[in-house]
Amino acid sequence: MKHIVLVVGLFFGSYAIADYRASISTITPQIKARMIKGNSWRQGCPVSLNDLRYLRMTYRDFSGKDRQGEMVVNRTVAAEVTRIFGELYEADYPIRKMKLVSDYNGNDWQSIEADNTSAFNCRKATGSKHWSRHSYGKAIDLNSIENPYISRSGRIAHKASLQYRKRVHRNNRAVDRAVLLRNDKAVKIFKNYGWKWGGDWSGVKDYQHFSK
């Protein structure tokens, strides 16, 4: 694996690995305004904006093109998230899109429908009254259509995800490689950093979900 270079300033850092680029910054007034207007953060959330970081990261989309994505995570995991996505990039793992959930009005359903990869969203856990790990910026949903949430009864809420109930790789197309299986390199990359995968849960399965 190529060496990852870290340059740290007082409030931000940046990483480079081959053509991969990533940066870490505090939540600027502009990003704060987007998060509030987009209903992803509000007063009463379990973390303050000072505890969050805004990331810009290169990813390969489903057509193989390099894109710059964005994500908000907890400051304690910001550096390792950029390393994780650097390794995903190096492994040629494709990502449909990577936008703030604020662009979907903080609506998890709409973000999933768009097959968006995202992290922070101040919301309750699915089917619970407790805060989701997303509310702390310590969870990431990766390619949410190809990696659906499946309830204990076997229900998949998003119609586009029904074809991915059977967890198998059928070919080498990007959309197929986006499907996460237990022995896939993408899953192992997250686990190497101590992140838990929703595909390992008993009963409920949340194949898109990684949490720290």
Image (tube, rainbow, N blue to C red):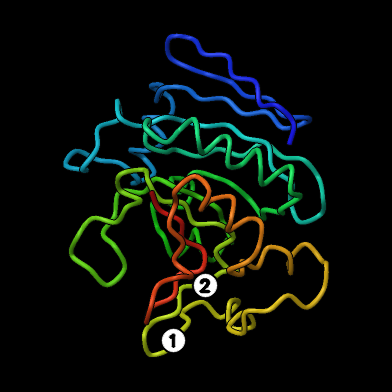
Secondary structure under badge 2? loop
Q: Nearer the viewer, residue 54 or 196?
A: 196
Other residues around mark 2 within 10 Å, as few (<14) / some (14–19) / many (≥20): many
List the residue tagged with mark 2.
148
Residue located at (27% from left, 72% from top): 127
Indicate left or right for 101 with 4 as reference: left
Mark 2–mark 1 distance (CA, rounded to whole Å): 10 Å
**Quadrant assignment for the N terminus:** top right
Residue kind at label 1, given as amino acid type: Arg
Residue at position x 56%, y 69% in the image = 147
Three-letter amino acid code of the residue under disc 2: Pro
In the rendered image, residue 38, in percent from the top left (x then y), is placed at 39, 44
Residue 21, placed above or below residue 205: above
Return the x and y of residue 102 as percentages of the image width and height: 43, 45
Whichever of callouts 2 and 1 sits on the residue coming sooner in the sequence is 2
**Mark carried by residue 155:** 1
Disc 2 to disc 1: CB gap under 8 Å: no
Q: Which disc is residue 47 wearing?
A: none
Q: Is 67 displayed left or right of 30 in the figure?
A: right
Residue 59 point in image, percent of width and height: 69, 42
Q: What's the residue at 59%, 50% (across, down)? A: 189
Determine which quarter of the picture holds residue 42.
top left
Query: Residue 156's spot in the image, x, y percent?
Result: 48, 82
Q: Please determine whether, in this image, residue 184 is positioned above or below residue 40.
A: below
